[in-house]
């Protein structure tokens, strides 16, 4: 949701709809939505309930109960959706330890301890210890957001990650 909210703030709902399933789903304006590449006419969604449903699969789809209910099922985006592509640079792994370096790398956007546990597959206690060491070193900071505590890299943490070649 955070990734999609950032898209809304940068390009509005039309940009989000265009990015959900690139080349397939497009906002055409004037309450019209294109839902696939077939020659079907665009759907008129004026006054209809439009649901957005994220899923963890890589494919999305649409569903409708005409004339008043439409759903766009789309692949998740953001840190929890892409477990690949997080190879820890050798030097950073040697300096901090591979697991701790992975936590630091993931904190380019704020995450809770529970999110870090889910993404890394590390035990909650291990993630907590890594965060404590990174906090004490001044590489991450924490802030409360409702009931959650979110961690993110500090300026010093950014320098360390960039120096590692990321």
Image (cartoon, helix red, strand yellow):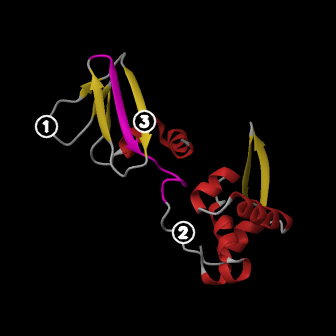
Label disc, if present, on residue 86 of the rendered structure: 2
Q: Mark 2 near mark 1, Cβ–Cβ under 8 Å?
A: no
Where residue 86 appears, as percent x and y from the top left, is: 54, 69
Q: Residue at image x 74%, y 67%?
A: 157
Mark nearer the N terminus (2 vs 3): 3
Taking the spot 53% from the left edge, 53% from the top edge, the residue there is: 80
Which residues fall within the magenta stretch? 67-82
Which callout, 1 or 3, points to the residue nearer the camera?
A: 3
Q: Residue farthest to the left?
A: 39
Q: Reply yes or no: does residue 94 show up in magenta.
A: no
Q: Position of residue 9 (x, y in %)?
A: 55, 39
Q: At 72% across and 71% down in the image, what residue appears?
A: 159
Is 72 within the magenta? yes
Q: Which mark is residue 39?
A: 1
Along the polypeptide, which appears first: circle 2 or circle 1? 1
> Residue 120: which quarter of the image?
bottom right
Mark 2 touches mark 3? (CB < 8 Å): no
Q: Residues within 10 Å of mark 3 (few under 14, many from 20)?
A: some
The residue closer to the viewer here, 87 or 130, is 130
Q: CA distance from mark 2 to mark 1?
A: 40 Å
Query: Would residue 10 appear left or right of 26 to someone viewing this image?
Result: right
Identify residue for label 3. Answer: 53
Q: Quadrant of residue 28?
A: top left
């Amino acid at each position: 949701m955070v990734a999609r909210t950032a898209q809304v703030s940068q390009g509005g709902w039309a940009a989000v709809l265009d990015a959900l399933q690139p080349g397939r789903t497009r906002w055409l304006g004037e309450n019209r939505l294109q839902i696939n590449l077939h020659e079907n006419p665009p759907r008129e969604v004026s006054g209809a309930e439009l649901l957005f449903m994220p899923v963890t699969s890589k494919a999305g789809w649409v569903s409708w109960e005409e004339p008043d209910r439409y759903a766009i099922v789309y692949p998740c985006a953001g840190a929890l959706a892409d477990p690949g592509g997080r190879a820890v640079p050798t030097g950073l792994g040697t300096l901090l330890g591979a697991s701790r370096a992975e936590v630091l790398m993931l904190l380019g956007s704020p995450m809770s301890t529970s999110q870090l546990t889910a993404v890394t597959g590390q035990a909650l206690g291990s993630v907590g210890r890594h965060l404590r060491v990174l906090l004490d070193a001044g590489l991450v900071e924490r802030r409360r957001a409702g009931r959650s505590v979110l961690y993110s890299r500090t300026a010093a943490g950014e320098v360390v990650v960039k120096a590692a070649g990321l």
